[in-house]
Image (spheres, rainbow, N blue to C red):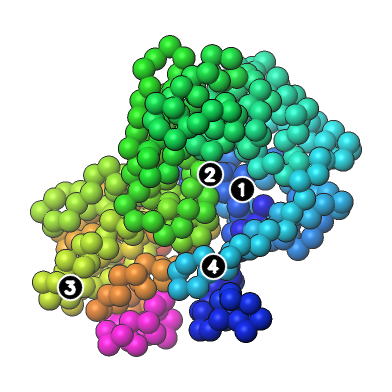
Amino acid sequence: MLDRFVCGAVERISHEAPIPVVNAQRHVDMPGGANNVARNIAALGARAFHLGVVGEDAPADDLRLQLGASSGIEADLIRDASRPTTVKTRYVAEGQQVMRADAESGAPLAEAIERSLLERFPRCMPAVDLVVLSDYAKGDLSDSVTRAAIDVARRPGKKIIVDPKSKHFGKYRGATVLTPNRQELQQACMSPCSTQEEVEAGARAIVAESVCEIMVVTRGKDGMPVIASDEAAVHLPTAARQLFDVSGASDTVVAAIAAGAAVTPAATLANLAAGIVVGKRGTATVSQGEILAVLRPSDRRTDPQKIFSLETVLPLARGCREDNLLIAFTYGCFDLLHPGHIFLLEQARRTADRLIVGSNADLSIRRLKGPEQSEVARATVLAAVKSVDAVVIFSEDTPITLIEALAPDVLIEGGDYSVATVVGADFVIARGGKVVIADLLNGHSTTETVKRVTTSATA
């Protein structure tokens, strides 16, 4: 599944019908559906073996390229020329979705494609700890494929997590965890699921039929109950703070549960992760560092914990502006903190009242440099630097989204850059801010530091 976001502005109503006319200005394609589950699993530090079916078309090529560039994902996408790759196109104006158009087929897989899928699935078993069946009712997970996959996974005792779309949950019998939303549960148990008590009763009825061992029901603003047959239900309140886009939120929940150990603690983290991802635009992922930031937020320089997500750092930035304090921003991988970095950070801090530092997440740093120290470790070291007021982990290759959200007064980069090559320089200058090219500390770069250490070790 490919999620396409067509972004623009609505300036008039159509004369043909009472509908808005979107002046499309750009579009962004993102891996959606089960692809997004795999991306979220990888973003949380686990490894995903991703098996699925796509068409013989341009969206399939796009998905292959994007998943191939995602560290931590080994994708095996079977091409089927008889069906299109599912594409969900969302039209977005002024940050709000105004329409969605789907191009898809829900027809069952051809016999040869189904056979190929079931031949490849058992080969993954020796390398995995658990199996996620992400059912989007597009024909891949037919009753026979689902039954075969669960039987194969159960033989070696793998945990099986199912995100269901079928109205008949008996199809998933033998699963460890089911993660339906309220409406899906209501359809399956054929009774109202409006209240907390009704949801628990419906879930327990299905668990009692041995369809699954545990059910985690996503109820949006009403939270997330965890129900097991022999335990009291655990009701987790919603963790969402600001709602921008719910695209892919259920994928994040499934991935966070998959990345956890015991289901209830994993569901607690999944609830936090979902609260973060709905505060982002598009089909987004959540990193370990962002969850850490929610668990231990801070907005004071004297607090040793200064790691933020984009959503939690924005109130800090607003508070600075209310107090007429200038904000400086710099960014980088900071994969090996050395005196040159400290020199840069101190210069940056002297340009403003507060310094916010953007640090690349694991996914982006691997794309740029290959395997490195974890994002949490790098952010923790940065947060210990006296001149740094806040560290924000970003997963994109550049911090332009972060820069546009923070709108810093000063943007700083090292002396090996020019103003023309600094990401976000045009945006900051257009808003009346300034770009500062900081001096470099001679003899102190990551490359030179590694070279000295290597030379010393071999001497």
Distance between mark 3 and mark 1 Cα atoms: 39 Å
Tell me the CA gap for discs 1 and 2.
Answer: 7 Å
Tell me the residue that label 3 is attached to: 321
Q: Residues within 10 Å of mark 3 (few under 14, many from 20)?
A: few
Along the polypeptide, which appears first: circle 3 or circle 1?
1
Horizontal and vertical percent position of residue 41: 52, 41
Measuring from the top left, give residue 258's x and y in whole percent: 51, 33
Q: Which mark is residue 33?
A: 1
Q: Which residues are magenta?
A: 418-439
Can residue 402 be seen here? The reply is yes
Q: Secondary structure at mark 4?
A: strand
Question: Which is more N-terminal, label 2 or label 1?
Answer: 1
Picture residue at 43% right of the left edge, 51% below the top: 277
Tell me if 30 is positioned left or right of 455 in this view. right
**Which is nearer the eye, 408 or 210?**
210
Q: Are the residues flagged by discs 1 and 2 in contact, CB closer than 8 Å?
A: yes
Which is in the foreground here, disc 4 or disc 3?
A: 4
Q: Measured from the top left, where is residue 401 in percent x and y? A: 41, 68
Judged from the image, the secondary structure of the residue bearing numbered disc 1 is loop
Residue 389, quarter of picture: bottom left
Residue corresponding to mark 4 = 98
Which residue is identified by label 2?
A: 251
Please say if the residues under marks 4 and 1 sit with CB atoms less than 8 Å apart: no
Residue at horizontal 53 percent and vertical 50 percent from the top = 248
Mark 2 or mark 4: which is in front?
4
What's the amino acid at mark 2?
A: Asp
Kind of residue sitting beneath label 4: Val
Determine if the magenta segment contains residue 82.
no
Horizontal side of 71 relative to 337 (left or right) equals: right
